[in-house]
Image: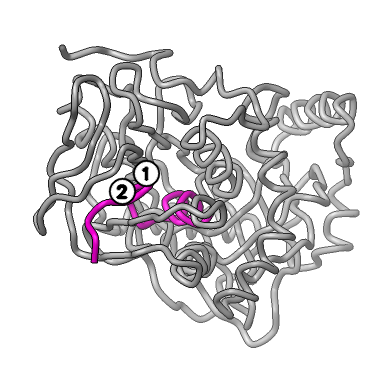
Amino acid sequence: MSDTYDAIVIGGGVNGGSTAYNLAKRGKKVLLLEKDRLASKASGAAAGMLAAQAELDEDGPLFQLAKKSRDLFQGLAGEIKTLSGIDIELINKGMYKVALTNEQVKEYKQIISIQQKCGETVQWLTGDEVRSKEPNLSDAILGAMYIEKDGQVSAPQLTLGLLKSAAAIGVDIREYISVDSFLFESERVSGVVTNQGNFFSENIIVTTGAWSKRLLEDTGLQLETYPVKGECFSVVSHQPLLSGTIFSHGCYLVPKKGGRIIVGATVKPNTFNQQVTVDGISSLMDKAKKLMPSIAEAEWEKAWAGIRPQTFDGLPYLGEHPIYQGLFIATGHFRNGILLAPITGEVMADLVEKKQPSVDLTPFRINRTLKTLV
């Protein structure tokens, strides 16, 4: 098999899968390299919330990007099911951003006003109205933003679905191949050096999440990113305890099929340590019980942690390397990697094809907060 490709994607997570899938749909010969197993890092650990309105409080570039990406999931779910047979478990039963203090009540009502002026569907529910829809929720909840369009998916299924769909239309996917460095000709990228030899392409896309900074340092860049550990756990009950997703500061409850609920997530910056701690899980348990006391009777399933890439201004990096042509970067999605995956794949494919993306990528440009090492 030839070792030369139209594009090489580095990273087997959700954004790598989306990028490879979109490039293959456009007829490109694509190689995807993953140093471990597919979906083995943040993409496989995520709860899968599509919290465009719940997560982002103000109208801005990230809010607009998130909304556009959220709108792509319905069509993408069908494509993935057709190509791979994988159900990404897209659920659109709304999201409740719940208020536990009077200050939050005031804040969330202001956010509702802002979002409604932007044409978004969102409404305020009193505590009693919330409990009429979700009877197991606590009396401590004073009210909630009800966001009809914010749904959820299975993050592992979405990631594997994108990757398997990409493979189905011709992407060459290889696990356990680590990229050590890049090859350059003048000021253009020409390939990668790996533990399994060299592979060649004039278009290389780095989608390695929190590990992107290390890989790109050899290209003279010091990305303004840092790793953030998030711990989660899951429980199971015979009777479903929730229908919609519950979102609060410091804790969320995401109901999955079969009576399963994912509870997350802690925020521990500047560490690649993926150990699950007693302190982290116990703090989540306390917050979850405050939101929904009956969760205490659910059966324990498991706990895990993922490492998410955050940037110093909270915006992802989406664009071309400021020095080397053909080297593209998509990282820094933090808690919105699943949500932003569809649009990330589209815009990265646009950049490779030298097409104008459907969204303005200026706020996400690589050199906006960049330190140069050379």
Furthest residue in direction bottom, as rendered: 238
Report the disc number at residue 10. 2
Q: Above or below — where is 173 with respect to 350?
A: below
Task: Mark 1 and mark 2 in contact? Answer it, CB < 8 Å.
Answer: yes
Seen from the viewer's position, the closer of residues 13 and 181 is 181
Give the mark, 1 or 2, whose residue is nearer the N terminus: 2
- Relative placement, left or right, of 260 versus 151 is left
Count numbered badges in the picture: 2
Seen from the viewer's position, the closer of residues 151 and 255 is 151
Residue segment shown in magenta: 1-21
Q: Tell me if mark 2 has few (under 14), some (14-19) or many (20+) residues whose alpha carbon lies within 10 angstroms of its own.
A: many
Q: At which x and y percent is residue 89?
A: 64, 71
Report the disc number at residue 259. none
Report the disc number at residue 207. 1
Q: Amino acid at mark 2?
A: Ile
Furthest residue in direction front, as rendered: 2
Q: At which x and y percent is residue 44?
A: 42, 62
Q: Quadrant of the C terminus?
A: top left
Q: At which x and y percent is residue 81?
A: 63, 74
Determine the image quadrant of residue 82: bottom right
